[in-house]
Image (cartoon, coloured by chain):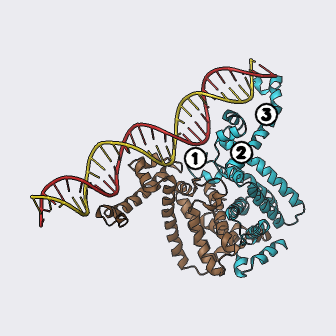
Chain colours: A cyan, B brown, C red, D yellow
Amino acid sequence: MNATQQLDGRSSRWQVHREERRRELISQSRRAVHRLGPDVSMEDIASAAGTSKSVFYRYFGDKAGLQQAVGEIVIAQMQEKILTAAKSATTAKQGLSAMVSAYLQMAETSPNVYVFVTRSTDAAGSAAAAGNALGNFFDEITAMITVPMRELLGSADSPQVMYWPTAAIGLVRSAGELWLATPASPAKPDHVAMAGLITNWLTSGILPDIAAPASPTLTQTKETA
Amino acid sequence: MNATQQLDGRSSRWQVHREERRRELISQSRRAVHRLGPDVSMEDIASAAGTSKSVFYRYFGDKAGLQQAVGEIVIAQMQEKILTAAKSATTAKQGLSAMVSAYLQMAETSPNVYVFVTRSTDAAGSAAAAGNALGNFFDEITAMITVPMRELLGSADSPQVMYWPTAAIGLVRSAGELWLATPASPAKPDHVAMAGLITNWLTSGILPDIAAPASPTLTQTKETA
DNA sequence: CAAGCGTACCTGATACGCTGGGTATCGTGA
DNA sequence: TCACGATACCCAGCGTATCAGGTACGCTTG
């Protein structure tokens, strides 16, 4: 019971060390995944970090914990970028565009880390848990949409607030991953153009593109305007 | 060289049997996954089908092969439902709505099978292959949107045709899985309402819901009208 | 033409290798 | 003494190898 006190010098001495070490382990993991791919084993991650598995299991519990820890770092960096962009944004659409752009940039920075962080690691069980515990990674991103949207709409439990943020993330994710996997070519949109396309699809849907079969340049212009 | 002929009756006599058996194994697998969850081992599937692993590996190569085989059956059933609904559809939006509805119904029929079929089984490797080889399951569904869309727009390689179908599937998938995982409550939209919401988001985006914070009923009406 | 043997292929089962996640044991340093 | 960290270990699960049957086909031969 006195263990809850944590006032023992022999305990508190480790606190700072643990936090520091944890950050270091996460950073090393990120590098290892970036180099070795999203399917790295815990053992390979550990040895790439110059230590052994037991350390990682002590710090993160299991592999899902490590994925989540790395994911939080990645999200934090993304969030930072979004917040600076949001300062100059006036409309909700501009804020959304900033998020899409940040998402693409995150995935682009290291596809391996992106996949690693994104995979849900099952962990859950039989039924439809796949949708619910969607890895906690997307949950955090979803919250970044849900919160502003809720105060924009007022109603807290409308189907829009309940489902649209998740739906939007799904669209961004799918389109982004395909874009990421597409080999470079003249036809491939660049980062900005892709973010514009996606943002327009989210806000206005596909009908405008059907009604007026505009050139991609036109569509892109519509976004930046 | 005469081995390429393959006219030997000792070989050909198995053709019909193999096809029949294969269908039976897929059907048994579907049942087994439905009962035992999406994480069933090959051994459990085999014993549930009254046989042993070796048969399954002979017929499907590996687990990914089995997943794909089951997936094709599921897609075929879904496609059948869509085609009948598409006969009475006149606008592209109605066709889209039919697809969304069919997708939701498919997932709803057996969440376990849905998850089993949906999971990509990695199989791919290091880089951004996750987006490209998205399991072949979503690829087939994507094609169901791409083909009509291409002839509607004319241009075959516009970014819209390249990316929107995948993006749309991503939206449907995310929203559908969250909807599936949501416990039943008065606030939860039913099948039809959810399909209407999703279809509207795909065609018109979220702006209409923001500009006029309509009640869900209104939004739903807009779709059925 | 018909009996019979060899052939091609399928079936189902068990045993095994291997990888990878997660745990328990034990030595070590402040 | 206590947390740390490395090694050894366990276990599940995928995929492979091997083996003993079983049955229709087809070619040969009397």
Residue B82 relative to residue C1: left or right: right
Q: Are marks 1 and 2 in contact (CB under 8 Å)?
A: no
Residue C23 screen position, x and y as percent: 61, 31
Question: Which labelled disc corresponds to residue A125?
Answer: 1
Q: Circle 1 — which element?
A: loop
Residue B128 screen position, x and y as percent: 67, 57
Dot 2: within a 10 Å radius of its alpha carbon, few (fewer than 14), some, or many (20 or more) residues?
many
- What amino acid is at disc 1? Gly
Q: Going from the N terminus, do you reach mark 2 or mark 3 first?
A: 3
Q: Measure the C-alpha gap from mark 1 to mark 3.
A: 32 Å
- What amino acid is at disc 3? Arg
Question: Which labelled disc corresponds to residue A32?
Answer: 2
Residue A142 screen position, x and y as percent: 74, 56
Q: Which residue is under mark 3?
A: A18
- What amino acid is at disc 2? Ala
Q: Dot 1 falls on which chain?
A: A
Residue drawn at point x = 46 percent, y = 54 percent: B61
For the N terminus of chain B, which image quadrant?
bottom left
Q: Is residue A141 above or below residue B199?
A: above
Q: Are marks 2 and 3 in contact (CB under 8 Å)?
A: no
Q: Dot 3 falls on which chain?
A: A
Instruction: Give the mark toward the camera: 1 or 3.
Output: 3
Please indicate, yes or no, whether residue B214 appears anywhere in the rendered image.
Answer: no
Q: Measure the C-alpha gap from mark 1 to mark 2.
A: 29 Å
Q: Circle 3 — which element?
A: helix
What is the quadrant of residue C2 in the picture? bottom left
Instruction: Give the mark toward the camera: 1 or 2.
Output: 2
Q: Measure the C-alpha gap from mark 2 to mark 3.
A: 20 Å
